[in-house]
Image (spheres, rainbow, N blue to C red):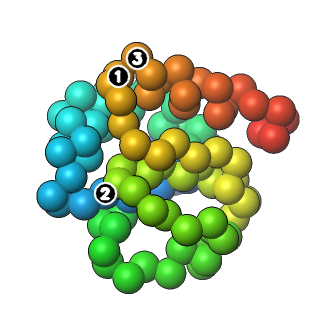
Amino acid sequence: FGYIHIIYAETKGKLLYLYSDTCAYCKAWENEIANIYLKTGFEGEFELSFIKFFSNIDLEKYGIKKKVKVTPTFIFLKDKTEVGRIEGYNGQELFWWQVDEIIKSDSLK
């Protein structure tokens, strides 16, 4: 259990993945990226959480004020503050570039 505690203690933020079961782009992301993301250093920076879009979840409890309008939407949080957002999914290369840009952004330094 000590190892698990250390991993979570090092997690700096959260990546909320808002999805719909009927969204083809969500399915594509899950098939192409989800398992890879969990094995990257990004997971150490932003722990991945799956949230069903129509689950009536109160996003304000995470500090999110801007509405989510499309699936998939990826919201990067640090200290209950949104530091980045990706709306939609247009393939692996663009997704990884967007993630890298958000993590490198000045708002995280």
SS under mark 3? helix
Between 109 and 8, which is closer to the camera in this rendering? Answer: 109
Q: Residue at x 66, y 71 (%)?
A: 65
Above or below, 20 relative to 63 = above
Q: Quadrant of residue 79?
A: bottom right
What residue is disc 3 on? 93
List x then y, in percent, for residue 44: 54, 37
Kind of residue at disc 3: Glu
Q: Nearer the viewer, residue 60 or 71?
A: 71
Which class describes the residues within 10 Å of circle 3: few (<14), some (14-19), or many (20+)?
few
| Quadrant where the N terminus is found in the figure | bottom left
Residue kind at label 2, given as amino acid type: Tyr
Q: CA distance from mark 1 to mark 2?
A: 17 Å
**Residue 19 circle label:** 2
Cα separation between marks 3 and 2: 20 Å
* CB within 8 Å, label 1 to label 3: yes
Give the residue pinned by disc 1: 92
Front residue of this view, candidates 70 and 28: 70
| Mark seen at residue 72 | none
